[in-house]
Amino acid sequence: KNYHTVLSENRKLYNEVQELKGNIRVYCRIRPFLTGENQKSTTIDYIGEDGELVLVNPSKQGKDGRKMFKFNKVYDPAATQEEVFLDTQPLVRSVLDGYNVCIFAYGQTGSGKTYTMTGPNSPTEKEWGVNYRALNDLFHISRSRRDTFMYDVGVQMVEVYNEQVRDLLSSDGSQKRLGIVTTSQPNGLAVPEASMYPVQSTSDVMDLMQTGLANRAMSATALNERSSRSHSIVTVHVQGVDLKNGATLHGSLHLVDLAGSERVDRSEVTGDRLKETQHINKSLSALGDVIFALSQKSAHVPYRNSKLTQVLQSSLGGHAKTLMFVQINPDAGSYSETLSTLKFAERVSGVELGAARSQK
Ligand code: ADP
């Protein structure tokens, strides 16, 4: 069988399974090679237009070393920030109609999570990530509706570090732990004590995010000095009033840059690093379990197993819309992390093609 046969079989299976999945989208983004990386040796064997990705094990020749994945979309390394945002835009806009939306980036440290969500350091407008583009778009659309709707937009920014929620925008720089209110109220705040700032322009948002990012807990790892061991969550609250009849609506957008998903050899870390690692593993698997339960339409969704899922609860499940960016590195050296990232994404999306099917 050639690729095309396998692809079309997989596509059929995928479409069948996707009918069941509800409001969960999974986009895979492959970051480009960085200077100094060996461009000759990659794990990416094939990128299909309909979200197929074939990963090849650099140390296993032949068909056994190949595995196919299928997502809603796969971006090749040349994809621009603008292209990525265009696919995200409808979700972002639905916030102005009263939806709760959660967009997050998952992947190992250095795979481009922050690049996708925020952009590089001091980004030019072209390099803006999803956060700035989303807010910019919300302001733009709300202005265009000003004859019929009046919108107020407020922003909170917290991080979850070692199962504690902290305010990244507190004016006195205090790092006190904050409580979470798990509520099914559409306009309820999950972290009511976190500072909330009204914003009216993209530059207001950029100023806030600079403060928040600077406050984010950082700790050096062997992989990447800037590696972040915390989850950062920007929450945009939108309150709209219909000027015709006074009816109000509330939508929220959670933009989440997750901690690195890399597996750390437990025998090599001790003390604080071991504790961090255990908390990260716990919260990422709790997030995976929640999304998996939602994709299976399970009666019980285990939100309570981590602080991360409690904070995000209102924008995961129900009528909320969820988008996961699965970030991967292209280089051969990242093969085992890439494989485990893709397996995580495959499991949470509820679409596992299975080795046999993809290796024919
Ligand atoms: P992570 O947040 O997953 O740790 P980063 O977003 O910091 O990863 O990305 C690691 C490096 O790769 C950074 O220098 C970043 O600017 C660069 N990078 C990531 N994705 C892209 C991309 N799509 N285009 C150009 N550079 C990228």
Image (cartoon, rainbow, N blue to C red):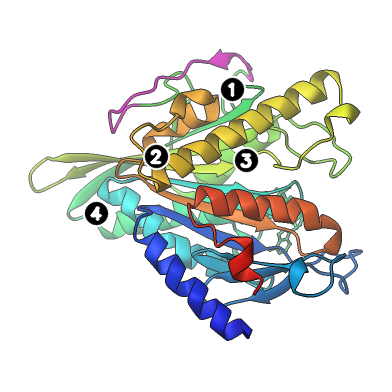
Q: Residues within 10 Å of mark 3 (few under 14, many from 20)?
A: many
Q: Quadrant of residue 207?
A: top right
Q: Residues within 10 Å of mark 4 (few under 14, many from 20)?
A: few
Please report whichever mark, 4 or 1, sits nearer to the chain's N-terminal start: 4
Q: Quadrant of ligand 1?
A: bottom right
Dot 2 or dot 1: first in sequence order is 1
Which circle's residue, 4 or 2, is located before the other in the chain? 4
- The residue mark sitting in front, 2 or 1, is 2
The foreground one among 291 and 119 is 291
Q: CA distance from mark 3 to mark 4?
A: 35 Å
Q: Amino acid at mark 1?
A: Arg
The tag earlier along the polypeptide, 3 or 2, is: 3
| Residue holding disc 3 | 258
Question: Would you say the residues marked 3 and 4 are in contact, meaning their CB atoms lie under 8 Å apart?
Answer: no
On the rendered structure, is 73 left or right of 219? left
Q: CA distance from mark 2 to mark 1?
A: 19 Å
- Identify the residue at horizontal 37%, vertical 52% (top origin): 23
Span colored in magenta = 173-188
Q: Quadrant of residue 39?
A: bottom right
- Under circle 2, the secondary element is helix
**In the image, is the residue at mark 1 within 8 Å of ligand 1 by its beta carbon?**
no
